[in-house]
Amino acid sequence: MLTGESKDVNNPDASLRGRSVVGVALTRDMRPAGEGWEGSLYNFRDGKTYSGKLAMKGPNVLELSGCVLGGLICKKQLWTRVE
């Protein structure tokens, strides 16, 4: 669920800053890796794309992790399916 943010205002492409973030692809070039996938993750909150991973942690939970500086700084989020 978005918390008041509805436009892609931080997108590095100025022509895309007015678009809705609903429906924006957050993952790119994902490929199988271990028990999940790895590729690129787009963060609309800062307009940057990070190397990242995603994996199912249960039938309704997706774990996303993104890193910068060659994996020196990483952050994880758990997303839960909304019914």
Image (cartoon, grey):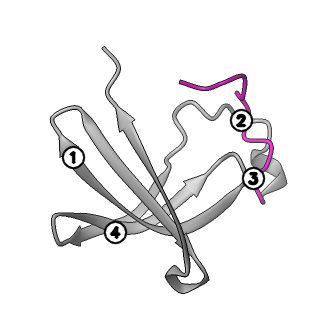
| Mark whose residue sits in front, 1 or 2 | 1
Residue 57, numbered label: 1
Callout 3 amino acid: Asn
Between circles 4 and 3, the one closer to the viewer is 4
Q: CA distance from mark 3 to mark 2?
A: 10 Å
Residue shown at 67% from the left, 31% from the top: 20
Task: Find residue 72 and report its image quarter.
Answer: bottom right
- Residue contact at pointers 3 and 2, CB within 8 angstroms: yes
Measured as percent of width and height from the top left, residue 26 is found at 50, 50
Task: From this view, report whether residue 77 is shown above or below residue 75.
Answer: above
Q: Who comes first in sequence, dot 2 or dot 4? A: 2
Q: Earlier in the sequence, mark 1 or mark 2?
A: 2
Q: Amino acid at mark 4?
A: Glu
Position of 20 relative to 11 (above/below): above
Q: Residue at x 34, y 31 (%)?
A: 80
Q: Is residue 83 left or right of residue 7?
A: left
Give how far apart the Cα atoms at labels 4 and 3 are.
22 Å
**Residue in view at x 39 percent, y 37 percent:** 79
Q: Which residue, given by chain and number where applicable, does mark 4 sit on? A: 38
Residue wearing tag 2? 19
> Which circle's residue, 4 or 3, is located before the other in the chain?
3
Alpha carbon distance from label 1 to label 2: 31 Å
Q: Secondary structure at mark 4?
A: strand
